[in-house]
Image (spheres, grey):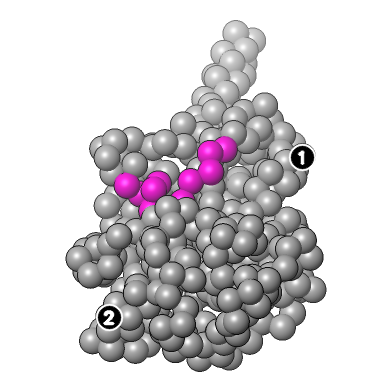
Amino acid sequence: MKRKILAWMLILVMALSLTACANKSGEAANNNGEPEKKSLEGTVLKVVAAYGGKEIIFEEFTKATGVKVEFLDMSSGEVLARVEAEGGKPMADLWFGGGVDSFIAAKDKGLLEQHFSPEAKSIPDNCKDKDGYWNGISYVLVGFMVNNDVLKEKGLEAPKTWADLLDPKYKDEILMADPGISGTNYAMVNGMLQDMGEEEGWKYFEALGKNVPFFAKRGGEPPKKVAAGEAAIGIIPMSGEFIAMEDQFPVKTYYPEDGIPWVPATMAIFKNADNVDAAKAFVDWALSVKGQEIIRDADPRVMMRPEVADHDMMKDVPMDKFLKVDFELFGQQRDEILKIWNEKLAK
């Protein structure tokens, strides 16, 4: 009898040991013996963001997961410079929105956390990192905004092409953001250099610079100044946030007829993030069909998932005019291009 009791006790101890080994990650097992996902409800996700409608986007993520979001609005170039200056110390958990060049540079500098989202399979290969360090959210296109009242007052017509912008009649009438700060404008500069060739491209930008009184310090500054009548023409990101200004101000937006620079609006997780689990959950949510639809409606853009229908505001995007670009060069050439830009065009 004692031997039977000892045998049963030994079996029980072994069973408990196996269970502990199976769950050594700290995850509880469900009825099927599979580990249950750790609850993130009530935790805080810290985000640096450069994306329109972010308040709505983060609110919907909180409703879906229970994760609270605290965010700081900051252009991608600013984010990269600050993280580098602080020795790679993450300023947040998640980086949401901004040009891909800064994300590629951040990956190369070891500043990002790897995450292969199961939802990323639906994202085009050229709009996600093959090593899982960043993913595209939507397409950011570069176009023009004009203030009709200012143009009429000065006897000017709206430019329709990049070549039009070089006309001396537009001197001091064009605003664009500094490409060292704005990922969208860096994408425009690099994309056009690739398209035109470096020699002709730099000639173009030197000529364009003569018509730009100063380079704005934020990507959203040119459209806001054009809408306010402080400038006639702005080179802008063609997102719903700015296109919608046509309903409130005497402005009109155009896609340039001689080619549309573009870049994926990107997101990534910072290396050594405090809440990496919530950051991964956000990436998965933002790449899901539901998340993409919410983001699309909060700030209308063409989304990365091809099965997500375009917002009415973006149905006429001439995608056949997209410039053919190599995004790896965006990251590799960033420092050199910005160095040349500062030498030739800094104001």
Task: Report how many numbered discs are placed on residues in the image.
Answer: 2
Compared with residue 284, is residue 47 higher up or lower down, i.e. above or below?
A: above
Residue at (33% x, 35% y) in the render: 89
Q: What number is the disc on residue 63?
A: 1
Where residue 321 sits, quadrant-wise, is bottom right
Where residue 154 sits, quadrant-wise, is bottom right
Q: Position of residue 185 (x, y in %)?
A: 43, 67
- Residue 192 sits inside the magenta stretch: no
Q: Which quadrant is home to the C terminus?
A: bottom left
Of the pair 60 and 220, the residue shown nearer to us: 220
> Is residue 319 found left or right of 41 in the rendered image?
left
Residue sitting farthest toward the top: 2
- The type of residue carrying mark 1 is Lys
Of the pair 113 and 150, the residue shown nearer to us: 150
Front label number (2 vs 1): 2
> Is residue 91 found left or right of 147 in the rendered image?
left
- Residue 80 sits inside the magenta stretch: yes
Residue at (73% x, 56% y) in the render: 298
Q: What number is the disc on residue 244?
A: none
Q: CA–CA distance between discs 2 and 1?
A: 48 Å
Regarding residue 95, the answer to whether it shows in the image is yes
Compared with residue 65, is residue 211 higher up or lower down, i.e. above or below?
A: below
Where residue 303 sits, quadrant-wise, is bottom right
Q: Which residues are magenta?
A: 71-81
| Label 2 residue SS | helix
Q: Which quadrant is home to the N terminus?
A: top right
Q: Position of residue 177 (x, y in %)?
A: 44, 61
First in sequence, mark 2 or 1: give its number.
1
Q: Give the residue at mark 2.
A: 202
